[in-house]
Image (cartoon, rainbow, N blue to C red):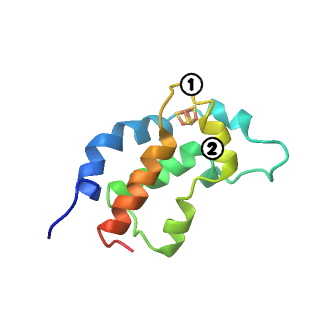
Amino acid sequence: MNKTMNSRQDVQSDTGFTLRMCALCPSPCRAAWPADLPAPLESELPSGLALLAMAVLDGQVVFDDGLKNALHVKPGARVCVEQCVYGLDIVGAIVRVRGASVEDGLS
Ligand code: SF4
């Protein structure tokens, strides 16, 4: 199978560290979630998204339509990520995992 540089295997080395850092983080950025939005589910916060993306990257979950929809960084999470204490590009990491998984035909 011919894969491009964005295949899931290639993304793993580039983003694995970033996702693990975020998934294990105590999530101080959650305080930035906009008060005018409904309270987030854990899976909508950056650390929850990173955990989901990591599971996809590691092949621990089936990348079905539900998971594909869940791996969208919503506006509230984007506000949180702007306050990341580590300056990590969580949005970029999640977008790369999602894109690579679609490209690898996992959905
Ligand atoms: S975005 Fe940054 S501050 Fe927020 S949970 Fe992830 S690593 Fe922690």
Q: In the displayed structure, does residue 38 sit left or right of residue 28?
A: right
Toward the front, the furthest residue is 4
Toward the left, the furthest residue is 1
Q: In the displayed structure, does residue 16 sit left or right of residue 71?
A: left
**Crowd tier of the residue under label 2, counting other residues whose Cα lies within 10 Å: few below 14, some 14–19, many 20 or above:** some
Q: Name the residue under label 1.
A: 85
Q: What element carries label 2?
A: helix
Toward the top, the furthest residue is 85
**Residue 78: which disc?**
2
Foreground residue, 107 or 82?
82
Q: In the displayed structure, does residue 37 sit left or right of residue 53?
A: right
**CA gap, disc 2 to disc 1?**
14 Å
Toward the right, the furthest residue is 36
Instruction: Tell me residue 106's x, y (percent).
Output: 34, 71
Residue at x-position 39% and y-position 70%:
62
Q: Quadrant of residue 41?
A: bottom right
Q: How many numbered discs, if any?
A: 2
Observer-side mark, 2 or 1, equals 2
Locate ligand 1 by image quadrant.
top right
Residue at x-position 30% and y-position 49%:
11
Residue at x-position 32% and y-position 61%:
59
Mark 1 CB within 8 Å of ligand 1 = yes
First in residue order: circle 2 vs circle 1: 2
Three-letter amino acid code of the residue under disc 2: Arg
